[in-house]
Amino acid sequence: EPEVTQTPSHQVTQMGQEVILRCVPISNHLYFYWYRQILGQKVEFLVSFYNNEISEKSEIFDDQFSVERPDGSNFTLKIRSTKLEDSAMYFCASSSGGQGGHEQYFGPGTRLTVT
Amino acid sequence: GEDVEQSLFLSVREGDSSVINCTYTDSSSTYLYWYKQEPGAGLQLLTYIFSNMDMKQDQRLTVLLNKKDKHLSLRIADTQTGDSAIYFCAERRNDYKLSFGAGTTVTVRA
């Protein structure tokens, strides 16, 4: 069964460093998403991406964040200058889109630890 | 309110039924979902219901939707130890984003 994959599973970085979190969505999906979950808190929407552009973003997704689909398979989230409060589990998701493809399938997550 | 609300904890005896409740916020939400998260793992889509339905059954899972009260529930029949996890309800407000509740931690005791 196709699934969303994410790398790395755990990333430790120092405050102020740039990180890139990588995702390979399900191959025929057209909509891509990033969510995050701070430890013990709810899952929060960050951004959605369709047709090579951002469809919607939350207040959390400020200028420090960017997303890119550099090729036909990868979808990345970059945090330019990490802060301690960026420590969280980051989930990538994808969906095929439309009424018939509304389900979002999530990857296993990348745990980001900022020290 | 603005948030999807869920009770935080549920303890259930093995073999009994579990019922997890959720209230959502947007009456125009088209789909409502239940996701399961096991320790250290990602979010597994369990089931969903379209907003014009009252009930959906999928093997041991039954979803009930009361659109008037914006209330959603998930019933797990014959709860097993493997059902111990955090269960999130989520609403789809538009084509793009899901809004999640805080999650209900279900503990199954022998």
Image (cartoon, coloured by chain):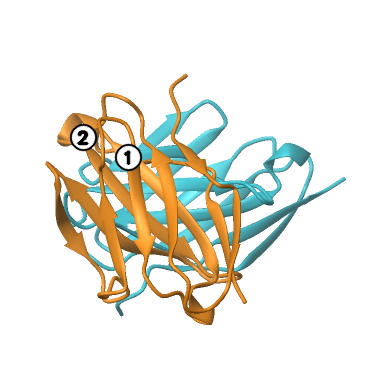
Chain colours: A orange, B cyan
Residue B92 position (above or below residue A66): above
Task: Name the spot of residue B45 as percent of width and height, x first.
Answer: 46, 39
Q: Is disc 2 in the same subunit as disc 1?
A: yes
Residue lying at 79% horizontally and 42% vertically, measured from the top left: B14
Image quadrant in which the N terminus of chain B is located: bottom left
Task: Name the spot of residue A95 as percent of width and height, x first.
Answer: 28, 37
Residue B31 position (above or below residue B1): above
Q: Find the distance from the CA under tag 2 to the CA under tag 1.
A: 7 Å
Residue at mark 1: A94
Give amino acid for label 2. Leu
Residue at mark 2: A30
Q: Nearer the viewer, residue B87 or A22?
A: A22
**Where is residue B89, by image quadrant?**
bottom left
Q: Outermost residue toward the front?
A: A17
Task: Name the spot of residue B43 as percent of width and height, x first.
Answer: 51, 46
Q: Answer left or right for B55 relative to A11.
A: left
